[in-house]
């Protein structure tokens, strides 16, 4: 130990710190911010429940049952209002029922929430064209 001006200094061995967590994913040029966030954050239970309801609603649409689809999709929307797929499928349901104004509004919202996903945005644009053809 070394004493200088009343202060005592000692030399102690330093232990190395071992990290037990995995390293953060590196962002590649092709990785979007949303993908990086999803790699770091697991979906909440509400978001997972919403996705299950969305899938049930989609199946109702496939079977030609827009009323039950709307009920499921509205529940999904209440759990996760930023899931653009809910808006897309709600637009499909209202289009099946012939309510063009409701279909157009949900299509507009789908475009807002799916604007960062090229595959879904293409589907939304195609849906918008079908809505316009139906309104003539």
Image (cartoon, rainbow, N blue to C red):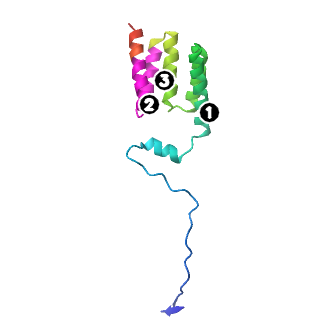
Task: Give coordinates of residue 25: x percent, y percent.
Answer: 48, 51
Q: Quadrant of residue 78?
A: top right
Any magenta on residue 120? yes
Q: Earlier in the sequence, mark 1 or mark 2?
A: 1
On the rendered structure, is 94 left or right of 52?
left
Residue 57 inside the magenta-drawn segment: no
The residue that disc 3 covers is 88
**Considering only order in the chain, which callout, 3 or 1, is on the residue closer to the N terminus?**
1
Q: What residue span does the magenta drawing correspond to?
A: 101-128
Query: Could you tell which of marks 2 and 3 lies nearer the N-terminus?
Result: 3
Q: CA distance from mark 1 to mark 3?
A: 18 Å
Give the SS element for disc 3: helix
Q: Position of residue 86 (x, y in %)?
A: 52, 26
The chief SS type of the magenta part is helix
Mark 1 burial class by Cα count in 10 Å: few <14, some 14-19, many 20+: some
Q: CA distance from mark 2 to mark 3?
A: 9 Å
Quadrant in the picture for the N terminus: bottom right
14 versus 2 height, above or below: above
Residue at the spot of label 1: 49
- Residue 106 position, x and y percent, is 46, 21
Mark 2, residue position: 114
Q: Are marks 2 and 3 in contact (CB under 8 Å)?
A: yes
Q: How many marks?
A: 3
Q: Secondary structure at mark 1?
A: helix
Q: Is residue 40 above or below residue 19?
A: above
């Amino acid at each position: 130990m070394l004493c200088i001006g009343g202060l005592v200094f000692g030399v102690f061995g330093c232990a190395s710190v071992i990290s037990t967590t995995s390293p953060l994913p590196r962002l590649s040029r092709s990785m979007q911010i949303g993908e990086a966030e999803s790699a770091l954050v697991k979906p909440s239970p509400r978001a997972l429940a919403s996705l299950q309801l969305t899938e049930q609603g989609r199946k109702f649409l496939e079977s030609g049952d827009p009323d039950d689809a709307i009920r499921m999709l509205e529940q999904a929307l209440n759990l996760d209002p930023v899931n653009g797929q809910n808006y897309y499928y709600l637009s499909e349901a209202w289009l099946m029922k012939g309510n063009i104004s409701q279909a157009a509004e949900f299509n507009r919202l789908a475009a807002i929430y799916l604007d960062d996903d090229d595959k879904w945005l293409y589907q939304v644009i195609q849906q918008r064209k079908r809505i316009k053809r139906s309104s003539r």
